[in-house]
Image (cartoon, rainbow, N blue to C red):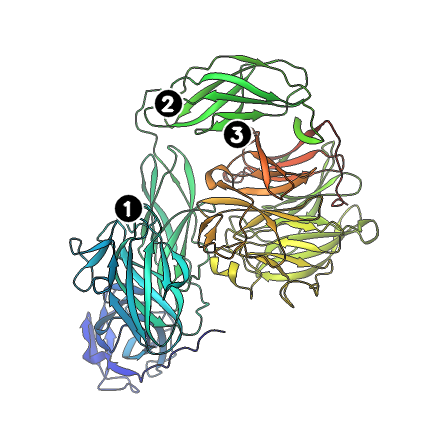
Amino acid sequence: MSAPGPALAAPVRYEAESATISQGVAESNHAGFSGTGFVNFDNVAGSSVEFTVTAAKAGQARLVFRYANGTADNRPLDVSVNGGLAADDRAFAGTGAWTTWMSAENTVNLNAGSNKIKLTSTGATGGPNLDYVEVEEAGAALEQEAEDAVVGQGAVESNWTGFSGRGFVNYDNVIGSYVEYTINAESGGEHDLTFRYANGTTADRPVSVTVDGANAQTVSFPGTGAWTAWQTRTAKVTLHAGANRIRATATTANGGPNADKLTAVLAGPPDEEAPTPPRDLRFVSSTHNSVTLRWEAATDNVGVTGYDIYQHGQLVTSVGNVLEGTATGLRPDVEYDWTVFAKDRAGNVSQASNNVPGRTKPAPPDSQAPTTPAGLRSTGATSASVSLAWNASADNVAVTGYEIHFDGALKQTADGSATTATVAGLTTGQTYAVKVRAKDAAGNFSAFSNEISVRPSAGGGTGTPNPGTVRQIASGVDVAWGLAFLPDGSALVTERETFNVLRVTEGGTKTVLGKVPGAMGTNGEGGVLGIEVSRTFATDRFVYVYHTYSGGNRLVRAQFDGTRLSGWTTLLDGVPKNRYHNGGRLRFSPDGRYLFISTGDAQNGNNAQNLNTNAGKILRVHPDGSIPSDNPFPGKAIWSYGHRNVQGLAFDSRGRLWASEFGNSRQDEVNLITKGGNYGWDPCEGTIGNCAGTVPPKKTWPTSQASPSGLTIINDHVFVATTVGQRIYRMRIDANGDLVDQQIYFQGTYNRLRTVEVDQQGDIWLTTTTDKDGSAGNDRILHIDIVYEGGAFTRPNTRT
């Protein structure tokens, strides 16, 4: 239960006619005003009224503006506090007459003492007639300058401008340097701690925050762009009445950020209102490894605190409450797809801005090729694959990848840091000529390595599933997202972008069964997603689909008579949506009694830890949509939580559920799911961040090497299809429930990969997802013959 919000102080009224007026005039010709009159803004953009208001203490305050607007048009105003934008294009709608006065409210943060509150018209019609502003101060804010706190391994300095007080604390660049503040709380309860800081580097400088030595939580302090650019980060803690020792301790060898001050405010009622989407996102400029973007401000009931910049669903960078950002670390001469999201102090995230393309420039002139990979050798073979190793190449800038050629043709790629690869899909007993070359960002290739001969041959084992021959089942599909097999061996396939459900036979016959009613896309990761076939299909003919619609995401059910789907019924709805992070995988339990549903956090990390929403969860329901009585949270469909965006689900031979999950910007992961488990997001990403008390992942990868979507399990070997990584990972589940013996297949061979499913014969159907270029029908469904070394396919009780 949240701590009760602080009582508001008695409002103080400031008349507009006594404020500073620019391009406007004080008048009294319309009745109903207070004081001696009101301000009539000139009908131009930029006309303004600036109030000087006094706050007893720093903290939140509610501003109530009384106004009249006798037109039918909105006359928006920007609201700024002490020079910082607090509300962009605050609406002042028509009131019906110039004698009809109404109120508009905004919550802002004020400093102790004098504050400047300025309202500036943003349109050619100017602002409304403005009568007054009333200021109601919220709970008392408690504040201490860092230079007045206890400093351990740091120094008080003043060589960078923009700080408050007499200076700031420069942490020593060591783990364990700290600043310890003393906050004397007037009453106990949950408080918002706001740290004002600057970080002129590009690296996060996280600190561990404790209260009286306990309840540690990690707070990140990302780069602010310059040591003179000051921003804030907020954490929620529980304080007791009286003195509280709040210590912020550096957790990395970089130390902490430059610390200016700490402000504590007794938390009021939870803020659950997200900002509006940023407007008019546009490409500004680029270099060979960066793109600069600009946008128009979002608005929020309390205040926007920053913006997240995404490239096709992947967080690239975050900025403070500014309207421009630069994404770095990009590849040369590549067109990226950009979107921006706004966030507020409570962690609420807006819906997406418009998306725009932005291409990096070609790499700087670089005519120096990497050195030749040496020592190419074969390190093992199965009946359908060979394993290779070589000595790393060097380059004047960086090796970005390797090409592996079989019989004179490109067969597969490897990451620039790799010196091994496994090449699958080969023919037993055939001899292949193999060589490798390195490449750099400028497109320079090294000479080829020594050439070797390899020959796939049976390698023993006990039913180890090795990918063999690959053939195309069907082409001309559009983001084939979900795939589920019917009893006759054909598959039902969903197309995310067209909303179609297809029936596809192994021979390649493709039939469109129709569109999912009410489905809609998000210009990102929403649309028609997962599909499952009832375990009792022979008698009930039920098919289940998870899709996006106007109100969010939902689970629906239909009946399939062999020709068409009909009788669509909604079983679960209202799961929050956004452009990205909609989840969508469906999987029946081995006994068919339960249906598991993966959801995304809808771009709002708060959702994942909030048990009052189904976003950022794995859900468990009966086939009729009802909630099982033995779910871990009574009356809720939630089976596990703390997920960012799960897109793969499968059961192993022991009936344990595994899930693949998209990370934010650092680590993707595979998890072994437990009843009621908390998997950490947000603030834990993989193994990074504040992960105390959460279930650790069984496998992580850098986000540049994975973005894991579909997941299937064959003979207790986990296969994961990846989008950014453009590869399949295979790992064995050992006796301890860990993932070992990782192999990488088909890297760069078939582009982005979405869904991987094992059919009734033990082979894999694999779908591609070339969904970044906007072209319809350019995806494929592939069949991978699985060769079982020294054994056979053990069919789990998870198929229809």
Residues under labels 1 and 3: Cα distance?
34 Å
Given the image, on which type of amino acid does mark 3 rest?
Answer: Gly
Residue type, mark 2 in image: Ala
354 horizontally vs 536: left or right: left
Residue bearing the label numbered 2? 394
Task: Give the residue pinned by disc 1.
Answer: 201
Task: Mark 3 and mark 2 in contact? Answer it, CB < 8 Å.
Answer: no
SS type, badge 3: loop
Relative vertical location of residue 627 with respect to residue 331 in this rendering, above or below: below
Q: In percent of the image, x 28 and y 77: which residue is there?
A: 130
SS category of the residue bearing label 1: loop
Disc 2 crowd, CA 10 A, few/some/many (<14, 14-19, 20+): some
Q: Position of residue 344 (x, y in %)?
A: 39, 62
Say which of 364 and 170 sits in front. 170
Work out whether mark 3 precedes mark 2 in sequence or the reverse, and give the earlier one. Answer: 2
User: Looking at the image, which is closer to me, 175 or 513?
Assistant: 175
Q: Which mark is residue 100?
A: none
Give the total number of marks visible in the rendering. 3
Residue of label 3? 748
Cα–Cα gap, marks 3 and 2: 22 Å
CA gap, disc 2 and disc 1: 28 Å
10 Å neighbourhood of mark 1: few (<14), some, or many (≥20)? some
